[in-house]
Amino acid sequence: ETRHEYDTMRFDQEAYFKKYGTSVLWSYAPKSDLTMVIALIFIVANAFSWFSQKHRWQMVADRLTKAALEDWTTSQGGTPESKDLRETALGILNEKPAESETVKENCKGSGKKQKGAKKLSAREKKKLEEEALLPIIKALVNDMDDFGGGFHKPTWKDLLVVTVAKMPYNIGLSLLWNAKYYLRRLQKLELSDEEREVLTERAVGPVVWDTKSEEEREAMMKKELWIKENRVEWEEEQYVANLSAADQKYYAKLKKKGKAE
């Protein structure tokens, strides 16, 4: 009987605990509230999407600030926007007599020549000017809510819940547009202005498209950039345009010899 009980309890530990009890006090963690867990994940996901959008805007803002402050050329990554921003900042600086005079006096070293006075170098003068321009440029950039191409300051529309809610609508619009596009192709109809615009935007990307003026967009649409050969040629033109004059001449020589990639 003892042997049978031993064999039984080896395979049924619950029977052992019921008869002899246990010296261990078991405690169970309370069950997690599923609603609270889902709510926490929801809040964290929305906060992440908001700060992610903020980071995207800040990256462009920092680059634009640096380009305007250091007066980057086109080959360095400067843009017409950074040039205009610098000109605006210089205009604001000149409108502030006190700050403008301080910069001029510092750049001259002194209004009166003093014995043993050290003349400022060109680099030191540039640094003084940049120190005066930096807060002005930062303030101007901070007023720019949207750089185009999705690089805008975060709003409630960038929250994950809004993006997910709008997703079926956006997918439906995309499917409807594509169905209409392919139906027109089967009917061998000419491309409409809307189709040319959408195809061009898809070819160059939303970031490039948003940064172009209406005239530049019209020119891009006329080049039919949705055709691969045309897009490659256009991209080469954009690359060469961002080079310095000397580099453009060198590139032209390489292309003439057939060595340019």
Image (cartoon, rainbow, N blue to C red):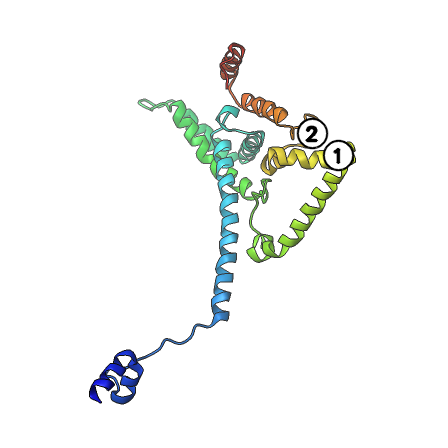
Rendering quarter of residue 124 = top left
Residue 110 visible in the current orientation: no
Residue depicted at x 59% and y 40%: 149
Residue depicted at x 76% and y 36%: 186
Left/right of residue 48 with respect to residue 195 in the rendered view? left
Percent across and percent down for residue 121 are 38, 23
Could you classify mark 2 by the number of other residues whose Cα lies within 10 Å: few (under 14), some (14-19), or many (20 or more)?
some
Task: List the single residue furthest toward the left.
Answer: 2
| Residues tagged 2 and 1 counted as in contact (Cβ below 8 A) | yes
Percent across and percent down for residue 201 are 64, 35
Residue 195 visible in the current orientation: yes
- Tell me which numbered mark, 2 or 1, is placed earlier along the sequence: 1
Q: Which mark is residue 193?
A: 1
Left/right of residue 71 with respect to residue 220 in the rendered view? left
Percent across and percent down for residue 260 are 50, 16
Residue depicted at x 32% and y 79%: 27
SS under mark 2: helix
Percent across and percent down for residue 210 are 62, 37
Reading the image, the residue beneath label 2 is 221
The amino acid beneath tag 2 is: Met
Residue depicted at x 56% and y 33%: 85
Could you classify mark 1 by the number of other residues whose Cα lies within 10 Å: few (under 14), some (14-19), or many (20 or more)?
few
Q: Could you say which is closer to the camera, residue 20 or residue 137?
A: 20
Instruction: Find the distance from the CA under tag 2 to the CA under tag 1.
Output: 9 Å
SS under mark 1: helix
The amino acid beneath tag 1 is: Asp
Left/right of residue 214 with respect to residue 109 in the rendered view? right
- Vertical position of residue 198 compared to residue 258: above or below: below
